[in-house]
Image (spheres, grey):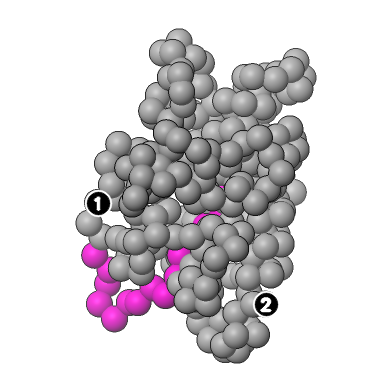
Amino acid sequence: MNFLTQKLPLFFPVIIVTFTIYHSAAALTLPKNVTIPAVIVWGDSIVDPGNNNLVNTIIKCNFEPYGRDYTGGVPTGRFSNGRVPSDLIAEELGIKKILPAYLDPNLQLEDLLTGVSFASGGSGYDPLTPKIVNVLSLSDQLELFKEYKSKIDAAVGVERREIIVSKGVHIVCIGSDDIANTYLSTPFRSPHYDIPAYTDLMANSASKFFQKYHANYAREGIVQTTSALSAVLRVGHVPPVSPPSVVRLHPFVVRFSELWSQF
């Protein structure tokens, strides 16, 4: 399906939550009589709370100095010195302080009922991106979501699961690895795609993901974000990326933003 000529259906309003890489989420006030039971997340390292710990990949951060500002100073697999944006959003919505990884072997029923993250560090819209580093693709994450719903069905019944899923906030945060890693750091895409063509490829892959999401798994609104690449690269990588490298990313951000606005 051509992303540039098709628009996705919206089945009911999206609750928009904004955050920055430098500060915790701003105080959020929900409309009266609105209760959000769960936060459900797909994406990459920005919102991966430790799924990659259980994936056979080198893209992990379950070691020091990661987690030094987390409770107990323990590295959890989050690509952060503490919590990640999905944790902050769940807290701001009054659900819980920590949004766990779906693959966490210590996951409890209450964790499932209030939401989890399926995100996998190193993943992307481009199907090649997760293959390069052997992490969970968006298709893999959707399959885990299907499994997640089956577990809730078995535990509390279909009716309650439908309420949890339909009234929950669904977030997709992904795209930076496509550009910073697959396009700029490997020879697999850049010889064959210029910047507009590659961002078109990303956008078309995004469209296919959301079509599959709506058709096969759920019909809820989604908050979609593509990470602020310059901020992520400046503060999230060791060693930091130099300013010239950040400047190279600007055309991708502009182009993808233009395409995304066509939803």
Rendering coords of residue 249 (x, y %): 51, 21
Side of 151 where 188 appears, left or right? right
In the image: residue 204, left or right of residue 247: right
**Which label's residue is closer to the chain start, 1 or 2?**
1
The alpha-carbon separation of the residues under discs 1 and 2 comes to 34 Å
Image coords of residue 193 (percent x, y)? 72, 21
- Residue 32 in magenta? yes
User: Residue 39: which quarter of the image?
Assistant: bottom left
> Could you tell me which residue is drawn at 46 percent across and 19 percent down?
239
Kindly report which numbered mark, 1 or 2, lies closer to the viewer in this rendering.
2
Cβ–Cβ below 8 Å for labels 1 and 2? no
Q: Residue tagged by mark 1?
A: 26
In the displayed structure, 251 sits above or below 80; it is: above
Magenta span:
29-43
**Image quadrant assignment for residue 247:** top left
Residue that appears at 74% across and 49% down: 1
Disc 1, SS: loop
| Mark linked to residue 122 | none
- Dot 2 surroundings within 10 Å: few (below 14), some, or many (20 or more)? some
Q: Which mark is residue 150?
A: 2
Is residue 6 among the parts visible in the rendering? no
Q: Main secondary structure of the magenta part?
A: loop
Q: Amino acid at mark 1?
A: Ala
| Amino acid bearing label 2 | Ser
Q: Indicate left or right for 47 with 88 as reference.
A: right
